[in-house]
Image (tube, rainbow, N blue to C red):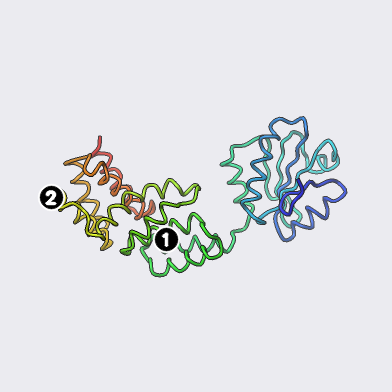
Amino acid sequence: MNSNHVIDASEADFEYEVINYSQNIPVIVDFWAEWCIPCRSLEPILIKLAAEANGGFRLARVNVDANPNLALKYGVHSIPAVKAISQGQVVGEFSSLQPERRIREFVAGIIPPSPITLAIEKANSLTETYDWENAEPIYLDVLEKQPEHPAAVLGLVKIYLATHRAEKASMLLQEFPESRAYSKAELLKPLAKALTDFENGSLPNKEDIDYFYTNCMRLVSRQNFEAALDGLLEIIKENRAYRSGEARGAYLGILELMGENNPQTRKYRSELTAALF
């Protein structure tokens, strides 16, 4: 079980492996026992999060049966019990088995943000204000340090879609890494296809509705997202199944491109719901 980020701690080495170690890096202590069934479910979650953090915190497992004095010192009355220690002090704790989402939130509150996390936050803020030029090199720098970082890949996809590089966006989407950002990437696929067809001059032009659809993609390419949404909404009202539902998919993709913090996103999402139902 012992590794660089996950250790078994005891009364003999707790001061060194946990208290002293926590002066530089937070330590999450998992109090457990062989007979504790919930502990068996909690353990793999904590180990997975420690691996994902890659040194952001240390996981120290303490068997309460073998180390009763530690359990007594830290007020462990039931297990599993988890204590987060930083600078030698308990800075957070929870008891009993929790959903993975809550455990992630607990861990996130303990670990200081990494340089990559801070870089992604900065790039995302720039992307939300359509400052593609300054956001792009930040995402690229993150990917140099951590290839296939989902948030960085997603950010680049959005930039490529907004700056006449839809084919490059489509290539990134085809191999998008499995992650919590995957669903957002899926929302962008129809828009990427439509813009790629537009940039290649391969959109249909037989009927009036085709002309309107092409014009919507032209508006997106000019970053006139709201006008494009207005046009797509009219197309959806006229023919929901147009291009096998691609108009609706492109509409949702533009909303994802605009971002949830854009005050117009909620308005246009409501308008789509009204048009469909």
* Image quadrant where one finds the C terminus: top left
Total tally of numbered discs in the picture = 2
Q: Is residue 113 left or right of residue 37?
A: left
- Asked if residue 230 is positioned above or below residue 45 in the image, the reply reads below
Point 52% across, 64% down: residue: 142
Q: Position of residue 251 (x, y in %)?
A: 28, 48
Q: Residues within 10 Å of mark 2 (few under 14, many from 20)?
A: few
Q: Residues within 10 Å of mark 1 (few under 14, many from 20)?
A: many
Q: Indicate the secondary structure of the residue bearing disc 1.
A: helix
Q: Position of residue 255 (x, y in %)?
A: 33, 51
Q: Amino acid at mark 1?
A: Leu
Quarter of the image holding residue 241?
A: top left
Q: Amino acid at mark 2?
A: Lys
Per the rendering, the mark at residue 129 is: none
Quarter of the image holding residue 112?
A: bottom right
Q: Position of residue 11 (x, y in %)?
A: 86, 46
Q: Is residue 2 left or right of residue 134?
A: right
Point 62% across, 37% down: residue: 98
Point 51% across, 67% down: residue: 141
Quarter of the image holding residue 161?
A: bottom left
The one nearer the camera, 106 or 90, is 106
Depth-wise, is mark 2 or mark 1 nearer the camera?
A: 2
- Asked if residue 221 is positioned above or below residue 237 in the image, the reply reads below
Q: Position of residue 181 (x, y in %)?
A: 46, 49
- Determine the residue located farthest toward the right in the rendered image: 12
Q: Is residue 127 left or right of residue 150?
A: left
Q: Indicate the secondary structure of the residue bearing disc 2.
A: loop
* Image quadrant where one finds the N terminus: top right
**Could you tell which of marks 2 and 1 lies nearer the N-terminus?**
1
Residue at mark 2: 206
Per the rendering, the mark at residue 156 is: 1
